[in-house]
Image: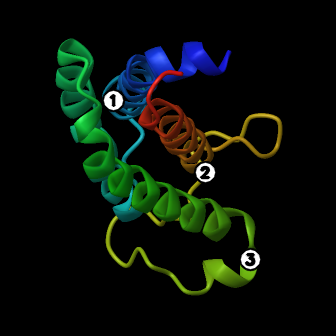
Amino acid sequence: MKRLLNTYGIYFAWIVAIVATGGSLFFSEVLGFIPCTLCWVQRIFMYPLVILLGIASYRTDRNIIPYVLPLTIIGGCVSLYHYLEQKVPALAKVASCQVGVPCTQEWINWLGFITIPFLALIAFILITLFLSFARTESE
């Protein structure tokens, strides 16, 4: 399993980025969910990963990993904050979204805890893990 993740980690990370970007566009363009400010910030960190990881996958280039990991970690932190803002009432009072759709708006709430920021957080975590496994050379 470790060898599989080491060999194909960049590809798996790229697939997760594609699915996350596609899901984001589906929610906004097909279902008509208007992104809040924090959603836009998460998009800023996720969308370039499709291109960067796609090129790295095509070239089998692990050298991009240290440059991409900060995007995934910062994006994940924004997603975590956004999710907590939705689920923890005390954080909702901070009101980081002053214009447009409030960041506390839950467009989806599957199983009582799965929201759009939660899905983004899972995607950022998966990409980070796949890239971390792909960092090390095969043994």
Looking at the image, is mark 1 or mark 2 nearer the viewer? 1
Q: First in sequence: mark 3 or mark 1?
A: 1
On the image, the x and y values in percent for residue 74 come to 41, 62
CA–CA distance between discs 3 and 1? 28 Å
94 left or right, relative to 40: right
Q: Which residue is mark 3?
A: 89
Disc 2 marks a residue whose amino acid type is Glu
Q: Which residue is mark 1?
A: 25
Disc 1 marks a residue whose amino acid type is Leu
Q: Which residue is mark 2?
A: 106
Secondary structure beneath dot 3 equals helix
Which of the image's four quarters has the C terminus?
A: top right
Residue at figure coordinates x 34%, y 65% from the top left: 100
Q: First in sequence: mark 2 or mark 3?
A: 3
Q: Is residue 109 above or below residue 90?
A: above
Residue at figure coordinates x 72%, y 84% from the top left: 90
CA–CA distance between discs 1 and 2? 16 Å
Disc 3 marks a residue whose amino acid type is Pro
89 left or right, relative to 16: right
Residue 81 occupies which quadrant of the picture?
A: bottom right
Mark 2 surroundings: few (<14), some (14-19) or many (≥20) residues within 10 A: some
Secondary structure beneath dot 2 equals loop
Q: First in sequence: mark 1 or mark 2?
A: 1
Q: Which residue is situated farthest in the right direction here?
A: 111
* Of residues 85 and 15, the one drawn nearer to the viewer in this rendering: 15
Residue at figure coordinates x 61%, y 85% from the top left: 93
Residues at marks 3 and 1 touching, judged by CB atoms closer than 8 Å: no
Secondary structure beneath dot 1 equals helix
Residues at marks 1 and 2 touching, judged by CB atoms closer than 8 Å: no
115 left or right, relative to 68: right
On the image, the x and y values in percent for residue 116 come to 55, 43
